[in-house]
Amino acid sequence: MTWWQAVLLGLVQGLTEFLPISSSAHLALVPHWLGWELPPTETFIFDVLVQTATLAAVVGYYREPLGRMAVGLWQDLRRRTGLGPDSRRALLLGVGTLPGVLAGVLFKDAVASAFTQPRLVALFLVGTALLMALAEVLGKRRRTMDEMAWWEALIIGGFQALALFPGISRSGATISGAMLRHLKRDDAAHFSFLLAVPIMLGAGGMALKDLFALPLTTLGQVAPPFLLGFLVAALSGYAAIRFLLGYLRGHSLWVFVVYCLAVAAFTWIWV
């Protein structure tokens, strides 16, 4: 992988991880559109690095609320005085993570095979568009994140589990799931981004374990362009979070619905 390929794919990962247009779909489709034949080992290493970069972006953006949740949960468990607001948010994130973990274990092979089928990726993009359209039509947008019940977090976590398949946007699915529970758009986005942290930590940890099992000579050969891709993914991911939160305060998801449908149609015709 050349340095400019790493920069382009890092930018694609950073922007599309948090914008509701599916990072997995774009990482699968962009090399296909451009006719790139990337070695599988290099692709694996790069995917691990840019996933870690976007995790760094969301942790960096939410460092203060995440810190409060960790401290609050520890103190409440130690004192046994019940759950405060920060502890309750931490519990909601934990409950919401469970469906994704279970789905990852059960459907690992099916998910891996889907990445090699562009038309299937395109169909999943249509699914993302339909989820967001339903959320805009049916969502009442009157509740905040702190009004959620634990079972609602579990439902939204079920939407996150769908995003294991390339083309189903994780942020699009979870924002849609939260809006279908009548959360405001920006509150839905906040919960979506916070919910990304536990699942990305788990997935990143498993991928890093496989990464360190590779020969050091392989890692050394690809390190310079890949580290540049990591930096681009982290910075663009942070920018995407800021943009989407500001955008959703006054705008709907319809522009992303149209985009997903357009990319799906282009991919189907291209293939």
Image (cartoon, rainbow, N blue to C red):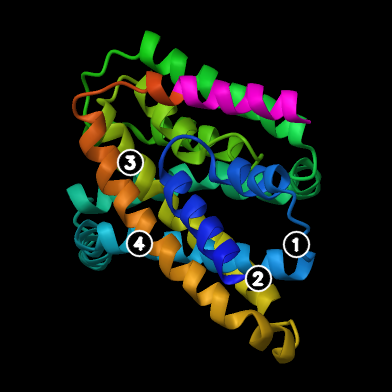
Q: Name the residue under label 4.
A: 235
**Distance from the alpha carbon under mark 2 to that under mark 1:** 11 Å
Instruction: Tell us which disc is closer to us: 2 or 3.
Output: 2
Amino acid on which the number 2 mark rests in the picture: Ile
Q: Earlier in the sequence, mark 2 or mark 4?
A: 2
Disc 1, disc 4: CB below 8 Å?
A: no
Q: Quadrant of residue 183?
A: top left
Q: Is mark 3 on a helix, strand or loop?
A: helix
Which quarter shows the N terminus?
bottom right
CA gap, disc 2 to disc 3?
Answer: 29 Å
Q: Which of marks 2 and 1 is in front?
A: 1
Q: Residue at x 77, y 40 (%)?
A: 114
Residue matched to label 1 = 38
Mark 2 secondary-structure assignment:
helix
Q: Are marks 2 and 4 in contact (CB under 8 Å)?
A: no
Q: Tag 1, which secondary structure? A: loop
Answer yes or no: is residue 73 visible.
no
The residue carrying mark 2 is 45
Q: Residue at x 65, y 70 (%)?
A: 45
Q: Nearest the camera: 151 or 188?
A: 188
Give the residue number, with chain letter if any, for mark 3: 191
Residue 110 lies, with reference to residue 176, above or below; the image says below
Q: What quarter of the picture does the C terminus occupy?
A: top right
Disc 3 to disc 1, C-alpha distance:
35 Å
